[in-house]
Amino acid sequence: MRWIKDLGTVLLVSLATIICVDVTGLIFKDHLQHIFPYYGVPIEEISRGYPMHHFRSDAELGFDINPNFRTSTSIKPREYKEYDVWGNTYGCFDDEWRDDQLADGIYLAGDSFTWGYAEYAKKFGTILQDRSQIPVFACGVSHTGQRHQFIKFNRLYEAGLRPSYVIVNVLSNDLDNDFFFPHTTVIDGYMVENIEYCGEFGSDYFEYSRLSNDNVNVTILLRIYSLTANVITDLSRRFRTPWFTQHNGHSTCKRSIYVGLAKIGAEYSHHAATLENRRVIEDWITHSVNHGYELIFSFIPPKDVNRALSHPYVMDFISQKGGRFESFKAYCERNSIALSELYYQQDGHFNEKGNAVYAEFLLEIIGEF
């Protein structure tokens, strides 16, 4: 049984070597970060930048807003002032909802545009409520598409929320969110991406990996504290990326879900990558018919309008399924409003003026009823 003893010796020596390398690496981590950018970087610095504990992990959704927790942010966006953010009892960045209001009102679904990027009083949902004098249930969740948004709405509906109107604020990157759903998790209180893709979407060399939430914790810890793990990861990536470099001209491995599905354009109605988005839109339309509320899909153009190539085809699909949509871009064109004035200078979200104008647009939509 000498081979067992020899194997044990090899394992012990290997483990001791790894420990020595990792301990030495931590001592010199500042000098090694130009080679391994994430090595020794605290989890909060490689998160998506939202304040600690604003989100929590969710087994079905991946993540959601943490109920009954208040904090603040000064970097969403960086060019704006610090403002408070919170989750109410229902896990929405909104004031508390009175029980006697739950049988009426307007529900707002959406991503970070609906979530915030402005103080509460300046959000378009708050302005809409002030102007219309109708209860508004603002429940945007950053970094989500319609699949996440519909499941969350369904939960609230089952909990007793019965709005008369549901407005789903649609963005071009919602297709990416729905393709990878469920994605993203929360580690040590911070929102962290758990999808890595390599290559350009649509090419023969596109691939992505999804880490389970249980494994992400270990992976992130190794990424931060283990020099050995960083070396192994870097070497394995160097074996994978020559194909991407050769065929795409550059290496494109990154931790992100945004692969540019909006560029699908006319293929939206039949492309496999948009199947889940089409399914959830149809499911939401069916739900609205069965439960008697008005459902409107409201399309918000991105700051770079060239990123919204799929919007006309998503609109066509909604019409074909008997749904209703509205276009904020068309509203601005009718009213000679310059879209460029509605976004932050260094960020793609609505500034305070953009929120105010969009609230007027929604008020006009509601007024039609």
Image (spheres, rainbow, N blue to C red):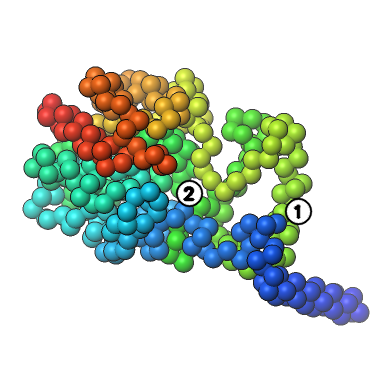
Q: Nearer the viewer, residue 277 or 256?
A: 256
Instruction: Please provide percent x and percent y for residue 217.
Output: 55, 64
Query: What amino acid type is highlighted by mark number 1?
Result: Leu
Q: Residue at x 41, y 42 (%)?
A: 347
Q: Position of residue 258 (x, y in %)?
A: 51, 40
The CA distance from mark 2 to mark 1 is 26 Å
Residue 314 percent location from the top left of the image: 38, 25
> In which image quadrant can residue 169 be found?
top left
Q: Quadrant of residue 315?
A: top left
Indicate which disc residue 183 carries: 2
Q: Is residue 319 visible?
A: yes
Pick whichever, 113 or 303, lies toward us. Answer: 303
**Mark 1 secondary-structure assignment:** helix
Dot 2 amino acid type? His
Judge left or right: residue 31 versus residue 189.
Answer: right
Q: Quadrant of the N terminus?
A: bottom right
Q: Position of residue 136 (x, y in %)?
A: 17, 45
Residue at left 49%, top 57%? Answer: 47
Q: Residues within 10 Å of mark 2 (few under 14, many from 20)?
A: many
Whether residue 157 is visible here, answered yes or no, is: no
Image-based side of 231 in relation to 5, left or right:
left
